[in-house]
C-alpha cells in the first residue's frame, strides 16, 4: 500500500543582518523568503518550504527595526539631528526593554546632503532619545551605538541629560567636537530615573577613547576628520576627561581607557560614565530577539550581511548565528565574500551565495537590484533544499 502522506516541509530560519547602504535586514529577509517560496511553487510542492523571518542587528544601525520586527512596538519622536536639524527618530519598546539607536538620531546617514561634519556633529539627539525612552519607564535601555556622525565624547548626549558644560565666561557650550576644547567647568544634574534603569551598551567595538587606537584616530577619518581635526578632537576629548575628573567623577580617567569607550565617537565613554554595562552586541541581540528558541524549530538557518570577510570571522553577527545554530546546516548570503571556500568550515557554513556571483553590476548602492538578486538566490536555495 502506497503512503499518500505529504513530506514534512523544510523549515528555514532566515536571520540576516542588513546589507549596509542597500537593504535593511527586514528587506533582505523578505526578498530571500519570497525566492524560497517561489522555488517551492515552481517545483509543484507548494508550501514545501516554511520560512520564519528574524531580521537581526548587532547594536549598530538597524537595531530598532530588528527589535520591532521581533515584536517590539515602535515609538516615534522628533529629536535634534547630528547638526541640530529636527529628525524623526524611533525607539523600540516591549513594556520592559527600550532600544535606542545612535544611527536614527545622530547618525552619519542623517547629515544634510551627506556632508561630513567632523567637528560640528553632536550626539545630543541620542541623549534626547534616551530621555524619551526613560519616560516609558523601562526596566532597561539598550543603547545601540553604531553609525555615529560625531566625535564629541558624548558631550551632546550628556547635555540632553542635564549636564552643563561651561566656557571660561560661564556660558553654556553646545555639545560637539569643536567645543570640547573650550570646556572650563562642568555641572551635573542627577536623574533618579537613570539610577533606577539598567543601561546596556550593545557594541562589539573595543577601542579606548584616546590615543592611537582611540575614537578620533581610528574612526575620525570616516567622519571627515583630517590629521589636524583628529589632533584637535583627541586634545578636546582629553580635556573633557580632565574636566569631568575635576567635577568630582573619580572614575572619569579610568573609564576613558576602558574597552569600548571610543565607540560611536566616544558616546560609549559617556554611557560608561552613566553606569552602563557593555556587552557583545551580536550575542545580546540574538538573546533579545530569542534566536535560540526560534532556531530550535527549524531545519536550516540562512544568515548573511553585506560582506563576509575576516571581520566576520572575528565575531560579527553571522559568526554568532553560526556558532549558536546547534549543528544545523548554515547558509550564508552576502553582497560579496572575501572568504575562500576552504575557510567556510571556520564558520560551519555549508554554502555561501553572493550577489556578486549573480551580476557584474555594483549592487551595494542599488536596493532594487539587490532585492531582485536576493530573490533569485532564495529561489536557488529553495531548489537545493527540496
Image (cartoon, helix red, strand yellow):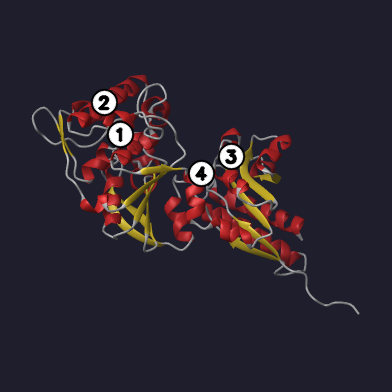
Check disc 3 and report the residue beneath it.
307
Given residues 335 and 292, the one toward you in this image is 292
Depth check: give the residue in front, 138 or 85: 138
Say which residue label 2 marks: 236
Which circle's residue, 4 or 2, is located before the other in the chain?
Answer: 4
At 17% from the left and 44% from the top, the residue drawn is: 189
Residue 20: image tag? 4
How many residues crowd mark 2 within 10 Å: few (<14), some (14–19), many (20+)?
A: many
| Residue placed under numbered mark 1 in the picture | 153
Which quadrant holds the N terminus? bottom right
Callouts 4 and 2 close, C-beta under 8 Å: no
- Residue 384: tell me if it is visible: yes
Cα separation between marks 4 and 1: 25 Å
Residue 339 placement: quadrant? top right
**Whole-percent x, y for residue 305 in the image:** 57, 45
**179 lies above or below 36:** above
Relative placement, left or right, of 109 versus 130 is right
Secondary structure under tag 2 reads helix
Q: Earlier in the sequence, mark 1 or mark 2?
A: 1
Amino acid at each position: 500500500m502506497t503512503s499518500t502522506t505529504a513530506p514534512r516541509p523544510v523549515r528555514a530560519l532566515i536571520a540576516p543582518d542588513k546589507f549596509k547602504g542597500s537593504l535593511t535586514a527586514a528587506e533582505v529577509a523578505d526578498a530571500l523568503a519570497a525566492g524560497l517560496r517561489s522555488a517551492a511553487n515552481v517545483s509543484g510542492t507548494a508550501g514545501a518550504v516554511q520560512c520564519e523571518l528574524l531580521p537581526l542587528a548587532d547594536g549598530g544601525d538597524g537595531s530598532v527595526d530588528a527589535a520591532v520586527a521581533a515584536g517590539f512596538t515602535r515609538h516615534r519622536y522628533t529629536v535634534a539631528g547630528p547638526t541640530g536639524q529636527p529628525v524623526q527618530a524611533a525607539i523600540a519598546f516591549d513594556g520592559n526593554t527600550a532600544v535606542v539607536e545612535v544611527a536614527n538620531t545622530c547618525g552619519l546617514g542623517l547629515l544634510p546632503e551627506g556632508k561630513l561634519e567632523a567637528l560640528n556633529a553632536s550626539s545630543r539627539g541620542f541623549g534626547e532619545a534616551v530621555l524619551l525612552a526613560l519616560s516609558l519607564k523601562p526596566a532597561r535601555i539598550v543603547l545601540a551605538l553604531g553609525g555615529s556622525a560625531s566625535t564629541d565624547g558624548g558631550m551632546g548626549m550628556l547635555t540632553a541629560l542635564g549636564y552643563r558644560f561651561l566656557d571660561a565666561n560661564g556660558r553654556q557650550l553646545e555639545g560637539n567636537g569643536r567645543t570640547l576644547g573650550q570646556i572650563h567647568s562642568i555641572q551635573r544634574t542627577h536623574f533618579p530615573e537613570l539610577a533606577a534603569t539598567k543601561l546596556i551598551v550593545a557594541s562589539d567595538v573595543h577601542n579606548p577613547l584616546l590615543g592611537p587606537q582611540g575614537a578620533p584616530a581610528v574612526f575620525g577619518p570616516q567622519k571627515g576628520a583630517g590629521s589636524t581635526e583628529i589632533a584637535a578632537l583627541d586634545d578636546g576629548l582629553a580635556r573633557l576627561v580632565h574636566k569631568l575628573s575635576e567635577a568630582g567623577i573619580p572614575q572619569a580617567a579610568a573609564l576613558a581607557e576602558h574597552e569600548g569607550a571610543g565607540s560611536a565617537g566616544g558616546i560609549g565613554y559617556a554611557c560608561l560614565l552613566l553606569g552602563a554595562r557593555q556587552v557583545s552586541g551580536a550575542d545580546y541581540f540574538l538573546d533579545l530577539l530569542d534566536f535560540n528558541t526560534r532556531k530550535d524549530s527549524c531545519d536550516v538557518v540562512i544568515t548573511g550581511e553585506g560582506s563576509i570577510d575576516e571581520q566576520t570571522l572575528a565575531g560579527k553577527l553571522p559568526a554568532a548565528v553560526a556558532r549558536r545554530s546547534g549543528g544545523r546546516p548554515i547558509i550564508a548570503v552576502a553582497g560579496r565574500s572575501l572568504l575562500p571556500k576552504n575557510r567556510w568550515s571556520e564558520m560551519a557554513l555549508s554554502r555561501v551565495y553572493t550577489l556578486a556571483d549573480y551580476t557584474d553590476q555594483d549592487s551595494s548602492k542599488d536596493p532594487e537590484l539587490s532585492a531582485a538578486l536576493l530573490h533569485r538566490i532564495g529561489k536557488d536555495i529553495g531548489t537545493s533544499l527540496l
